[in-house]
Image: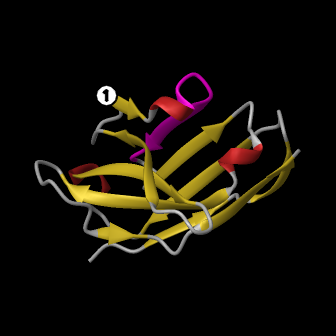
Amino acid sequence: QVQLVESGGGLVQAGGSLRLSCAASTRTFNLYTMAWFRQAPGKERDFVAAVNWIGTSTEYADFVKGRFTISRDNAKNTLYLQMNSLKPEDTAVYYCAARPNGRVGYNYWGQGTQVTVSS
């Protein structure tokens, strides 16, 4: 069982930055591929970014490429999402998720952290 706790959300003006963190309660953090998803009000949950177990390979949704950076610190069991040049349309609840390396679906989810970008 892996518990994930996000933090770092808040209210920011358009063009600003935020860094989200996701702390994982597992001794085997490096056995999981990690990702960020987001869900805006009335919309489906969307994939944002993912990073492999060692942090050498990343994947991004087109709408965040060049603005967001996903990273991880396996020594601290923590996942990050650096968000720059934020836009009002980035407003959503952001969730971190974990899936065992080699598996398809994300098994574990955090409770989410709210990000609100004002225009």
Seen from the viewer's position, the closer of residues 52 and 12 is 12
Residue lying furthest left: 102
The part of the image, by quadrant, that contains residue 9 is bottom right
Considering the image in quadrants, where does the N terminus appear? Answer: bottom left
Q: Residue at x 29, y 39 (%)?
A: 52
List x then y, in percent, for residue 53: 27, 42
Judge the density around disc 1: few (<14), some (14-19), many (≥20) Cα neighbours within 10 Å: few
List x then y, in percent, for residue 36: 46, 51
Q: Residue at x 52, y 26 (%)?
A: 65
Residue lying furthest top: 66
Q: Is 70 colored magenta in this rendering?
A: yes
Q: On the picture, is 16 further left or further right than 26?
A: right
Seen from the viewer's position, the closer of residues 60 and 53 is 60
Residue lying furthest front: 42
Q: Residue at x 25, y 68 (%)?
A: 107
Considering the image in quadrants, where does the C terminus appear? Answer: top right
List x then y, in percent, for residue 28: 26, 60
In the rendered image of this protein, does residue 110 appear above or below residue 15? below
In the rendered image of this protein, does residue 60 appear above or below residue 28? above
List x then y, in percent, for residue 26: 33, 67
Name the residue carrying label 1. 57
Q: Residue at x 58, y 33 (%)?
A: 68
Q: On the picture, is 100 further left or further right than 59?
A: left
Part of the protein shown in magenta: 64-74
The part of the image, by quadrant, that contains residue 114 is bottom right
What is the three-letter code of the residue carrying label 1? Ser
Mark 1, secondary structure of its residue:
loop
